Image (spheres, rainbow, N blue to C red):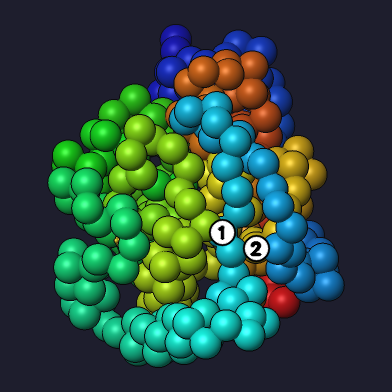
Amino acid sequence: MTSRRDEILKEIGITPVWRLRVQESLAEAQEVSSEPAPPVPDTRALQPSFEGTSPVSHQTGEPSRVAAQPSALHGSSAPMLRRSAADDDERRAAIIRMDWAGLKQAVAQCVACALHARRNKTVFGVGDENADWMFVGEGPGADEDRQGDPFVGQAGKLLDSMLAAIKLKRDDNVYIANVVKCRPPGNRNPEPDEASKCEPYLQRQIELIKPKLIIALGRVAALNLLSREASIASLRGRVLAYRGTPLIVTYHPAYLLRNLPDKAKAWEDLCFAVKTMQSLQSGPSVTT
Ligand code: SF4
């Protein structure tokens, strides 16, 4: 008789090859409460890098760049750039004092970057505002732009199946958001200025939710959250951090829809995340 778990694994395309490993991994995760916490991320490895980058979009396949950091502007001697940086600092300071209602209203009315011009709806985020788990993607696509919710359509369906495989639901102990709240035209990657302008909203969401663990979905989300250039292969399987909150990187569901063999790797990442969460819930905090 086929179990619900087998059905889910079949749906996300990693059975029967992974059935045995799934059972082993989950059994291991359930035993982890007696194990020591995952290694504390090395903050020296998390220093921002402003070097030119060329990650490839999971949606378009086009080269992109990591978001420029505000501090990159501080070094400029141009008065206009200093003024812009001061404005950004002032705006960020206002955003990080907002409560949920103020934050939602600010996003709904935001015109801080060029993405506001072509959006239908802002996509704030969805889920449990006291969640232990927070999943962060890159930006809204066409379906999300129409509906105002993150991860709908086929990629959203796959994400829901991935969550179900580790006994999670998007509205129960899970919150889902994106790096940018408005759809980049043609599903391109967010430009550095767009991601930088939108980052205070995500920062504030994370501060309000206080998740125990962030899962970065895809390379673009990971690079923007970590402010560093790296391959997704080098980021997977490690406990990193966003402003002190443990962070794990895996593939974006939209990428997995087109790269079926990597679903098995995504499953490894989810099992690692479950194990890490077990350690976080039972052991000392993992902070940087
Ligand atoms: Fe504002 Fe973010 Fe939308 Fe840009 S993407 S207009 S910063 S909410």
Q: Nearer the viewer, residue 3 or 264?
A: 264
CB of residue at label 1: within 8 Å of ligand 1? no
On the image, the x and y values in percent for residue 194 come to 42, 59
Q: Residue at x 48, y 52 (%)?
A: 191
- Write down the quadrant of residue 280 in the picture: bottom right
Q: Nearer the viewer, residue 64 or 80?
A: 80
Q: Identity of the amino acid at label 2?
A: Ser
- Write down the quadrant of residue 204 in the picture: bottom left
Q: Nearer the viewer, residue 47 or 174?
A: 47
* Callout 1 touching callout 2 (CB < 8 Å): yes
- As drawn, the label of residue 105 is none
Q: Residues within 10 Å of mark 2 (few under 14, many from 20)?
A: some
Kind of element beneath mark 2: loop
In the picture shown, does residue 6 fall above or below 178?
above
Q: Is residue 70 left or right of residue 205?
A: right
In the picture shown, does residue 113 fall above or below 58?
below
On the image, the x and y values in percent for residue 162 come to 47, 34
On the image, the x and y values in percent for residue 209 come to 40, 72
- As drawn, the label of residue 227 is 2
Q: Identity of the amino acid at label 1?
A: Ala
Q: CA distance from mark 1 to mark 2?
A: 7 Å
Q: Residue at x 30, y 84 (%)?
A: 98
Kind of element beneath mark 1: loop
Q: Which residue is mark 1?
A: 67
Q: Quadrant of ligand 1?
A: bottom left
